[in-house]
Image (cartoon, helix red, strand yellow):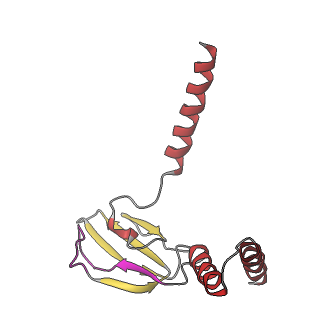
Amino acid sequence: MLAVSVFLFVVITSHVESVSASEEDVGTQVRMLLSQIFHMGKLQCYECPNCDEVDKSTPKKKNCGACVKAVTTKPVKIITRGCVGSCEGLPKIPNTDIYCCESELCNSTTQIKSNLKLICFTLLVFIIAKYFQKLY
């Protein structure tokens, strides 16, 4: 907690010193900066026990730390969306894929978390293509 406090102090101090504006503008910018660093448990997530798709009428829950979407495939496909305090420490459930995200209403999409292997593979292909482009 102390490290987070020190980090926030350094970030806020350096940000405020670099801004030449009125005190009200600085206060607004500090609040915006803090809200970008931490969601402060104020995310809004879709929350429904069995919903394949979401729309405007889908219930939402406020003051969430993170949004989740659980897709159970056996014996029947069931999609559950909801709200948790954090993405850390979510349980492993047989026949269920659990996706967790930390942005506003992010549990609406079919694929929430990015696939790190795909990103690395794409980056590798790009680097190799650039290398061969220089050879020819």
Q: Overall secondary structure of the magenta stretch? A: loop
Residue 131 image position (x, y, % from top left): 62, 23
Q: Is residue 44 magenta?
A: yes
The correct choice, above or below, for 78 with respect to 3 in the image is: above
Quarter of the image holding residue 52? bottom left
Residue 49 image position (x, y, % from top left): 27, 79
What residue do we see at 46% from left, 60% from top? 113
| Relative to 46, 113 lies left or right | right
| Relative to 116, 44 lies left or right | left
The foreground one among 86 and 35 is 35
Point out the image quarter for the N terminus. Answer: bottom right
Quarter of the image holding residue 74? bottom left
Point out the image quarter for the C terminus. Answer: top right
What residue do we see at 61% from left, 74% from top? 37
The foreground one among 75 and 27 is 27
What residue do we see at 49% from left, 71% from top? 102
Residue 43 image position (x, y, % from top left): 45, 80
| Relative to 77, 26 lies left or right | right
What residue do we see at 79% from left, 80% from top? 6
Q: Residue furthest top?
A: 136
| Magenta segment | 42-58
